[in-house]
């Protein structure tokens, strides 16, 4: 009897873990960057099979614009080129970036390459967001260069459904980083409230002492 109850409990636990995993996957948001419409359609099919929410753009510049980094970079250049310039650095749209759990980008694109996009992302507020590079060319030096710059994976085209399974680990890590940032923010706010309350309490005590003295 005890063995049957134990087996039923294990089965229920597995169902709960699977349900929790599916729920988490629905909250994963992938930013996909590829200049090829055919490749974007293929990637869309693969990612949506995994229940991920996907945003597609066709260039590195549009990816930076979506993240709110394009204007920030332009402002930095304008500020450094002229000391009398009134332009000032503006932080990226953090609320937008918090919604992106992973960036997957093609390596070879007109204008900004996937490697350049990788460097921009890793040098910004979004450095903790995993970046995966795709390419149809298996060039070891290129793969090593991207991995050294901070890419989580270098996938060879055409992509397979098994490649999407490799992304899950990085998505979970990204979700954990997002939760840590939120927790730190909440802790900071709580500490500020506590300091203000303590300050107000001390101010009230001083006022009462002064009234008693008078």
Image: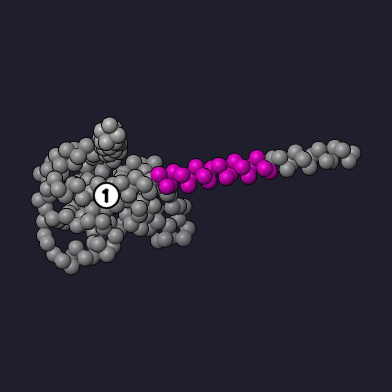
Q: Main secondary structure of the magenta part?
A: helix
Across and down, in percent, residue 9 comes to 29, 34
- Name the residue: 65% across, 40% down: 197
Residue 16 seen in this snapshot: no
Q: Is residue 22 left or right of residue 184?
A: left
Most foreground residue, 86 or 37: 37
- Name the residue: 44% across, 43% down: 182
**Is residue 167 inside the magenta stretch?**
no
Q: Quadrant of residue 3?
A: top left
- Name the residue: 47% across, 58% down: 84
Q: Quadrant of residue 155?
A: bottom left
Q: Is residue 9 left or right of residue 35?
A: right
| Image quarter of the C terminus | top right
Q: Is residue 209 left or right of residue 71?
A: right
Across and down, in percent, residue 49 comes to 16, 38
Q: Quadrant of residue 8?
A: top left
Query: Magenta span covers which residues?
Result: 179-199
- Total number of numbered labels? 1
Furthest-bottom residue in this view: 141
Assign a secondary structure to mark 1: helix
- Name the residue: 33% across, 48% down: 174
Residue matched to label 1: 169
């Amino acid at each position: 009897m005890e063995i049957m109850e134990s087996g039923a409990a294990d089965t229920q636990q597995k169902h709960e873990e699977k349900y929790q995993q599916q729920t988490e996957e629905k909250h994963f948001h992938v930013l996909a960057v590829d200049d090829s419409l055919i490749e974007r359609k293929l990637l869309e099919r693969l990612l949506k099979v995994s229940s991920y929410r996907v945003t597609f753009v066709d260039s590195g510049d549009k990816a930076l614009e979506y993240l709110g980094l394009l204007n920030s970079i332009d402002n930095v250049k304008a500020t450094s080129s002229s000391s009398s310039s009134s332009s000032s650095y503006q932080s990226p749209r953090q609320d937008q970036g918090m919604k992106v759990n992973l960036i997957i980008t093609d390596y070879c694109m007109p204008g900004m390459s996937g490697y350049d996009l990788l460097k921009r992302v890793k040098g910004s507020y979004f450095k903790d967001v995993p970046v995966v590079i795709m390419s149809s060319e298996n060039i070891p030096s290129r793969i090593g260069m991207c991995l050294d710059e901070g890419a989580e994976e270098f996938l060879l085209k055409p992509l397979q459904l098994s490649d999407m399974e490799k992304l899950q680990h990085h998505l979970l890590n990204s979700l954990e980083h997002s939760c840590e940032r939120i927790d730190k923010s909440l802790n900071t706010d709580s500490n500020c409230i506590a300091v203000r309350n303590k300050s107000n309490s001390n101010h009230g005590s001083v006022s009462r002492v002064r009234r008693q003295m008078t």
